[in-house]
Amino acid sequence: MPAHASEPDTTPLRVFADAAAFLAAFEAEVSRGGLWLPGADAPAGASALATCRVRVRVGGAASVEVEFDARLGTVAPGHGIAVVFDGVPEGLSALAERLRGAPDAEGAGAGPGSVADRLRRLSTPEKVQLALVADRETRFALLRDPNKTVHLYVLKNPRTGLDEVQFAVKSPSLSPDALVYAAEHRVFGADPQVRIALVRNPRTPNAVALRLLDLLPERELRTLAKGNGRPELVQAARRKVLG
């Protein structure tokens, strides 16, 4: 009888372009107890928090692949899965230590400016994935990233706090999508400081800023009516102040 073809390996996998990309994810995700695997499927029949085998592959000058055990966390069919663990798996810890000296990990070590250095090496999809799980320092760096696609995902990070949003919406370089998200968010959009900053921000779409006028304190409306803003908003504020 002919030999049966071996079954394809369905172990969830995350591939990193190079050592720098892996080390950025190691700091932002792995060191905090989890890892996102974009495009991966959950093992057949696995339930939440079930133990599963996971693979990580790093390309570039230091091509290597490791496997480790983790627990199944979030499952987003068609998008990927998140796995979690208590403490950094030994395989990942050893890999990080090895790659810190790899040729394509230059600039990825700790020290001033290292976060920005690592971000410059990431592709847009990698930055988006990182934005959803990044720590506070990395979130602030991503909010200043010239690739405005990632701004929205920083605000969607469940660890992003109100104080960070209050800071972010004041920036004229923040993407309009992120500004709209902040305005429509149940918590962020209810904060008076966020509302005022959104109205003052020239990047906030007019329709959103005009809607927020009805929610501003009268003192802020009077300030805006004196000419401190876009003409459409100034005129609308004057009409509201004059009744």
Image (spheres, rainbow, N blue to C red):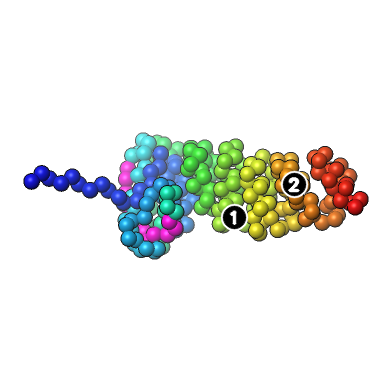
Rendered view: 12 above or below 71: above
Q: Where does the image place residue 64, in percent across and percent down from the top left?
A: 32, 43
Give residue 209's mark.
2
At label 1, the amino acid type is: Thr
Highlighted range, magenta = 64-75
Q: Position of residue 94 (x, y in %)?
A: 35, 51
Q: Residue furthest left?
A: 1
Q: Secondary structure at mark 2?
A: helix
List the residue tagged with mark 1: 160
**Residue depicted at x 71% and y 53%:** 194
The amino acid on which the numbered mark 2 sits, given as a three-letter code, is Ala
| Alpha carbons under labels 2 and 1: distance apart | 23 Å
- Camera sees residue 94: no
Residue 46 has which mark?
none
Mark 1 burial class by Cα count in 10 Å: few <14, some 14-19, many 20+? many
Q: Residue at x 59, y 40 (%)?
A: 148
At x 44%, y 42%, the residue is: 21
Residue at (51, 45) in percent of width and height: 128
* SS assignment for the magenta stretch, majority: strand
Residue 70 in magenta? yes
Does the magenta segment cover residue 32? no
